[in-house]
Image (cartoon, rainbow, N blue to C red):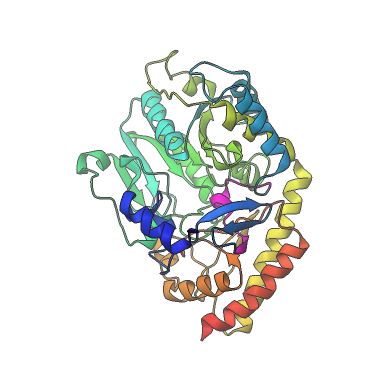
Amino acid sequence: MTDTNQSLFDRGQEVIPGGVNSPVRAFRSVGGTPYFVASAEGATVTDVEGTTFHDLVQSYGAVIAGHAHPKVVEAIRGAAARGTSYGAPTPGEVALAEAICERVPSVEKVRMVSSGTEATMSAIRVARGATGRPKLLKFAGNYHGHSDGLLVSGGTAMASLGLPASAGVTESAVADTVVVPYNVVPTLDESFAAVIVEPCAANMGLVPPAPGFLEGLRAECDRVGALLIFDEVITGFRVARGGAQQLTGVTPDLSAFGKVIGGGLPVGAFGGRADVMDELAPLGPVYQAGTLSGNPLATAAGLAVLELLDDDAYALIESRADCLAGALAVALAAAGITAVVPRWGTLVGLFLGATAPHDYDSACATDEALYARFFHALLDEHVAIAPGAYEVMFPGLAHDDASLTAIAEAAGRAAVVAAG
């Protein structure tokens, strides 16, 4: 018997909570049955029923060169043939660390981990260790992974599910986390170890930094001796060769990375000033470890991707993002749907309302019911966007003119259906 999306979802729900391994994949906020991907190539994914979709999810930004890029596949195969994990240092992890440090001037030293959650969690730990201070400031709607101290007023699937925080997180775990509105420079005191921020918020839809916001954070951190942490898990190596800090000109003390640097494999990294990073064991008293950190398959894939990403590649992707944003805006307007389609660098958002959001509260005003209709209408047209109204779209090197034209035409038809 051939598996269908529904049969796999039914089987999954018997053995996996909700049938999925990350909440947004369950389609709870848009309704319906998730598609189960059997294969992917370039700008497309194909489900187990043989339907091929133009894919704007691209593994939520982890895939920038396109699915199954030959150079990435070749790198992974070569690494796998030599062994998949050693529990010992490898040349690949040194080479990837060198590549990150070369591309991001603020990163003098970097440590590899296995996820973005680990990267942000560890960056915060080292910031507290280096400063000897307890408090952390984060911004409402910024999502920094699912470690306990950060699961307060997060974006992404937490917003779609209407969760202000997570059960199982004690009051003491978040007692030293202060949450304030995005795009407003807070006033700190000497009890704060760090401020963590998405330099461009991409987990409450796409909300760019207001003029002066990041500069103000840098100045306020300097005033009280706190560290500024950029969460570049999404923006790092996605929006520019040096990430969001290259585009904004604001230099953080620490940065967290993920997604692109693993070429589609599980990876994360955090790095920054050498004096701060040297607080980590074995040099300093801040402990952090991971059996699979610096995994040879992930580092090989990440290096292969970074080699593809020169300034010309980013200019090309940005032009494609601009085309995508323009096409979506035209399609929605033609169908009588009030919408804002922001673009920041190579990222594209979608806000179903009249005014572009500037913080979490305004982002939550998007019309989620309309988004669900548009999402399913696009799926019927063989275009896949994220099954949640607070994610962004990730055009990449594989989205050529033919792909963008097909998406634009499909969006026009889907918008009419969604408008009713």
Instruction: Answer whether residue 221 is visible to the viewer in this image.
Output: yes
Q: Position of residue 249 (x, y in %)?
A: 63, 42
Instruction: Look at the image and say whether residue 61 sits in the magenta stretch.
Output: yes
Compared with 284, 308 (above or below) is below
In the displayed structure, would residue 292 be above or below residue 21? above
Residue found 44% across the figure and 32% down from its top: 123
- Position in image of residue 170 (x %, y %): 21, 43
Magenta region, residue range: 51-65
Q: How many marks?
A: 0
Q: Is residue 300 above or below residue 142?
A: above
Question: Which quadrant would residue 133 be assigned to in this image?
Answer: top left
Name which residue lies at 67% across and 38% down: 73
Q: Is residue 104 visible?
A: no
Instruction: Give the farthest residue toward the front.
Output: 1
Looking at this view, name the residue that lies furthest to the top: 283
From the top left corner, tell me how far across and down residue 128 is, in percent: 36, 29
Pick the residue in front: 191 or 106: 106
Q: Position of residue 175 (x, y in %)?
A: 24, 41
Residue displayed at 38% across by 64% down: 28
Q: Nearer the viewer, residue 347 or 410?
A: 410
Report the residue at 38% width, 21% height from top: 286
Residue 322 sits in quarter: bottom right
Please check the rendered image and state whether residue 347 is part of the magenta-colored stretch, yes or no: no
- Left or right: residue 33 compared with residue 412: left
Q: Nearer the viewer, residue 36 or 249?
A: 36
